[in-house]
Amino acid sequence: MNRILTLVKIDLGTTFKLSAFKHKMKNRNDMIQMIILGVALLSLLPAYILMISGLSSIYHAYLNMGQKSMFLLTGILTCQIIELVLGILYVMGKYYFSNDLNILVPLPLRPKEIIGAKFISLLVYEYITMLPILLPFIIIYGVNESTGILYWIYSIMILIFLPIIPLSISSIIVMLFMKYTNIKGKKDLLRTIGYIVLIIVMIAFQLKLQSVAERAIANEDFLYKIITDSTILVKKLGIIFPPSMWATLSLSNLTSISGLLYILLFVIASITVFFIMLFLSDNVFFQGLIGNLEVSTSRGSTKVKPKDFKKQYPSYISIAMKEMRMLIRTPVYLMNSIGGVVLMPILMVMSFFIEGEQSLSMIKLLMENNHGVVNLIGAGFIVILGFLNSVCCTTFSREGKYMWIQRTLPISARDQIIGRILSSIFVQVIGIIVLYGSLAYMRTLTLEGVLVIAILGLLGSIPTGELGMIIDAYRPLLNWDNPQKAMKQNLNVVICMGIGGLYVFGVGFLTYKLMATVDMLIIYGIIAIIFILSSLILYNPLKKVIEMQFNNLE
Amino acid sequence: MLKIQNLSKTYGKGKVKAVDNISLEVRPGEIFGFLGPNGAGKTTTIKMIVGLLKPDNGKVFLDNIDVWENPMEAKMNISFVPDTPEVYDKLKGIEYLNFIADVYGIPEDIRQDRIEKYLDIFELRNAIGDFIGSYSHGMKQKLVLISALIHDPKLFILDEPMVGLDPKASFHLKEIMRQRCNEGKTVFFSTHVLEVAEKLCDRIAIINRGKIIALGTMDELRKHSEEKESLENIFLELTENE
């Protein structure tokens, strides 16, 4: 246990850069950056407050239905599902692709000690992700119900144990997945495809359960039960993820013995699943890992032919090709960028797929006469994917220790911008193709849609890409030991999503206002002009930041 | 060729003077050795020449072009080989070399000739289709050397280039350095291997605690030293006295 704690201490220290943070607070430039970051985060506060007041009305709605405990279940279930899905992403990078493995594996440590330490570090991440979501639920319920001290004690226990089961399950799934995909040859490709399928299957499974639960409610004498049992909704919907139901029932049955039994069940189940995961890790972790650190080599068999030298490209094309190769060949980047743009459009149609033809025909009916709106939503979706795919807002961070190459070469800021935007466009094109597939499945794809989504989607991806690059060039995260940190655990992604989200919201709002009075073709034109103008406006500041940072970075 | 004027760099809010007001000039056709104990300021100076570290004070000129005022123009004529060869591990060797050649705008036929020539010299031809991640430290070092020679730079800067190279590659590198100087180009390198510096360099500078404490040809250095034998003795004497 001591060894696990030592590992956790080192891991948290390096993950959150505690010593670097102390150093940063002394440096004036870094201090200014931290202040700007603080202001950026504060700017998200109004939206957060709005969300909390929205939650408060949801509470009252459930209260009026006599199902107030559903409010707690909503919060707890949302958190656990998010943690389960995020867990899969985090676990993969943390357990299998972090650079510290080269140091840890040769040390006399048991797999369960390495995994135990990594698990605890990830827990800290999950707490940070979870608290802003769950706390409003707990507080709104607690304050409105004027509950006693026991409620808060149970709540703290729930907060502490909440991520353990989802993260343990993610760990088990990923470890088994890595063990059985550890096949020589096309391992990276196999794993990436498998990984995307895994996430789709998991979400499909959740949706299926939800639909089964909803049908169960519809089939019974529901009105009668809803009056007699104030936790009937929780019990029906809770089967999606039973631990969430146990946690909710412990809080809604505070004063009775069943409340105590539920909290005990929740805690014991969490601990049990954690130890099962740990036990399993001792047997399967190395089997998935070994061979992961080695790189395939074929000395001599892949002969270089003269034609390999016969391709001269302009600098920006060469940068774009380099970026694309790195994105495709680094599993963590591939999963987060291309994986993301492939997943999102599929997830969008998945609930219709699960619900069957009935829901599909409703959507078709709804959209039949609104093709223009569908096209705009599709284009907006692609623009949003542009910053969700994190390609531009981590483009310099991903250089990491290789940044010296870019900085010592005579590459102009213009070429850097064009090359890197092109690599993002490449990812976006894949997203567009998958979106076409999804829309075709929903039978809402038209030729006009194909054109509008491609043109507006790609035009809109340029300013959001530039915005991401400004943020990333201004505060690149170069000192990382795990590519996951450069991409998914990079605050630049969050900042970019916040500002990019506001931008898309602004354009969306304007479009909405115009729709009542202006012809759809003109709206397309206006949006295209806005995108082109914003690209031109952002270009110069971006060029300046790149030139400044390429000179000033240390 | 290379002119450094009053170059300074401090770390930690000016508490640590890594490089303290140094000036020197390297002429065309010269191999210039930059020596000094660990932490003396060698790498910091080199990073300021190649554009990786902005000087607090002072200027760096390459053929009268201010390296920090006109970085693009200067970088076209410089190439840099760092002490740790960190190269994109997910690219293949040939992809990396083509990327570098594209950036310098090297035409196809010239790039093929040069790449093939250096691949043969450094015996890397068989590995060039493999991912760089599979290379050993020495192979990466060779790849960086080749990439630094593709555009035939006027100024070739190397930080501890012999570390990690096998004796044969070391020998060839020294040959290349000498040959470049015969063609009127310049080589500037830092090293710990004093024998290499002694045999190879036209002039040598010794830096200690951020200051240049000796500068000149081997003969000139000998004159300033009581121990008039090897560079090793001169080096130890000078750095001890500081």
Image (spheres, coloured by chain):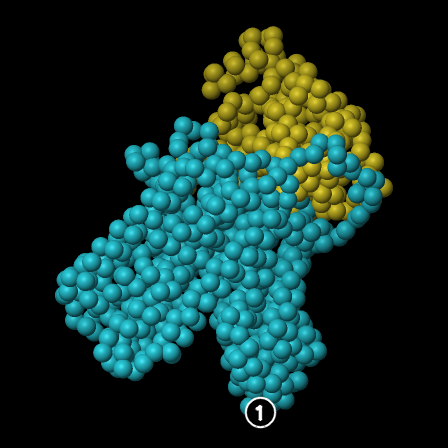
Chain colours: A cyan, B yellow
Residue type at numbered disc 1: Thr
- Neighbor class of circle 1 (other Cα within 10 Å; few <14, some 14-19, many 20+) is few
Q: In this view, which residue lies farthest toward the right?
A: B109
Residue A145 place in picture, x, y as percent: 19, 72
Of residue A264 and residue A518, the one placed in the foreground of this image is: A264
* Residue at 51% over, 42% down: A179
- Residue A275 found in image quarter: top left
Q: Residue at x 58, y 62 (%)?
A: A341
Of A29 and A60, which appears nearest the observer? A60
Residue found farthest to the front: A220
- x then y, percent, for residue B190: 61, 26
Q: Is residue B90 visible?
A: yes
Q: Secondary structure at mark 1?
A: loop
- Disc 1: which residue: A517
Q: Residue furthest bottom?
A: A517
Residue at the image point whose x is 29% and y is 48% from the top: A271
* Viewer-closest of B235 and B177: B177
Residue A339, located in which quarter of the rendered image? Answer: bottom right
Task: Please determine whether, in this image, residue A44 is positioned above or below residue A420.
Answer: below
| Image side of residue A178 versus residue A418, left or right | left
Which residue is painted at 38% across and 45% down in the image? Answer: A277
Q: Is residue A458 above or below residue A508?
A: above
Specify whether A228 is left or right of A107: left
Q: Which image quadrant: the N terminus of chain A?
A: top left
- The answer to whether residue A16 is seen in the rendering is no
